Image (cartoon, rainbow, N blue to C red):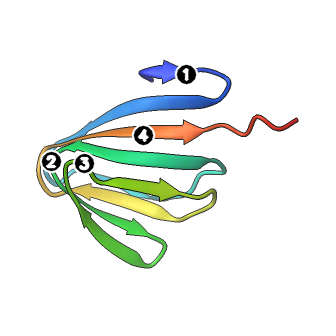
Amino acid sequence: PVSTDQHLRATLFFFFSGQEMSEHTTTMEALLQILVGEADITLDDDFHHVGPGDWIRMPPNLRHSITATTPLKMLLVVLRDTKG
């Protein structure tokens, strides 16, 4: 992680062209920002082609996957549930 505390965890990801992260879910809300490159992202059954500057907000339990279509750098911020 680039940064982590009780409220969030920020992680930089680097992908080679064609590299992918298979479909998965998380129990926490997350924000994804594309910094460099392009990718195909699937959110449940919706397909998106994204590039530099694009943001995606993912609510908890959303099925998602990502495939880099070029070398890719992205920032993932997971928002931790601080209730309780």
CA–CA distance in space, label 1 to label 3 = 22 Å
Task: Say above or below: 35 vs 41.
Answer: above
The residue labelled by disc 4 is: 76
Which residue is disc 1 drawn over? 4
The furthest residue to the right: 84
Question: Residue 31's x, y, as percent?
Answer: 47, 47
Q: Quadrant of the N terminus?
A: top left
Q: Amino acid at mark 3?
A: Gly
Disc 1 from disc 2: Cα separation: 25 Å
Q: Find residue 72 and name its label.
A: none
Q: Earlier in the sequence, mark 3 or mark 2?
A: 2
N-terminal label among 4 and 1: 1
Residue at the (59%, 51%) spot, across then down: 26
Give the amino acid at mark 2. Answer: Gly
Q: Nearer the viewer, residue 66 or 32?
A: 32
Residue carrying label 2: 37
Q: Are marks 4 and 3 in contact (CB under 8 Å)?
A: no
Q: Which one is closest to the eye, mark 3 or mark 2?
A: 3
Alpha carbon distance from label 3 to label 2: 10 Å
Q: Position of residue 6 (x, y in %)?
A: 68, 24
The x, y position of residue 47, in whole percent, is 33, 74
